[in-house]
Image (tube, rainbow, N blue to C red):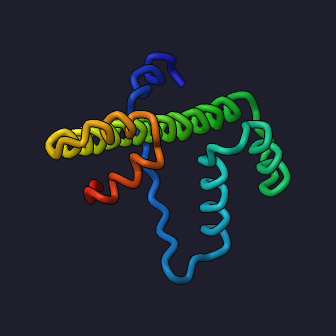
Amino acid sequence: MDLLKAKANYDLLTAIMVNLGAEANQAAKSLLKLLTLLLKSNMTLSQKEAIIATEYDIKMKNDIRNEVENMCNLSLGVYEEGMEKGMEKGLERGETRFANLMKKLFDSGRMDDAMRVVQDEQYRAQLMKEFAIQ
């Protein structure tokens, strides 16, 4: 492949649709199993390579190994990005809940309780229930 053509395709996406239907044949099931293996984020490249060699009789050359490694890194990147967004949302939700609790305590003149919830996690959870803060 011409190097200029290869660089021009770096940001292009190739999509493959596999329609298994109700009566998927063995080849389709095997393809789906292989794709699932390639996209697993909890396995190393070496583990995937060993399974691909034994179950599919595919010996990975360097170019294929690099592509599989890119796929592994892609799925890991998607997972990490999802975790990061989830953590951010969780922190925002926790801050909002805590602020709501403190406001209710201040509004009702419960300053001692406000001081206590800062240090006592169980008491904080108890008051969250008491004030029905979700």
Q: Is residue 28 above or below residue 81?
A: below
User: Residue 38, image x and y in percent?
Assistant: 64, 47
Quarter of the picture holding the C terminus? bottom left
Q: Is residue 116 above or below residue 126?
A: above
Quarter of the picture holding the N terminus? top right
Residue at horizontal 44 percent and vertical 26 percent from the top:
10
* Any part of residue 67 in sight: yes
Q: Tally the numbered discs.
A: 0
| Location of residue 88 by image quarter | top left
User: Residue 8, image x and y in percent?
Assistant: 39, 23
User: Residue 51, image x and y in percent?
Assistant: 80, 50
Residue at horizontal 61 percent and vertical 38 percent from the top:
72
User: Residue 43, image x and y in percent?
Assistant: 71, 43
* Any part of residue 92 in sight: no
> Along the line of sight, which residue is nearer the eye, 28 or 3?
28
Residue at horizontal 67 percent and vertical 45 percent from the top:
42
Residue lying furthest left: 107
> Along the line of sight, which residue is nearer the eye, 132 or 12?
132
Residue lying furthest bottom: 23
> Along the line of sight, which residue is nearer the eye, 105 or 83?
105
> Along the line of sight, which residue is nearer the eye, 100 or 13?
100
Residue lying furthest right: 54
Residue at horizontal 34 percent and vertical 59 percent from the top:
129
Residue lying furthest top: 4
User: Seen in the image, is 51 located left or right of residue 75?
Assistant: right
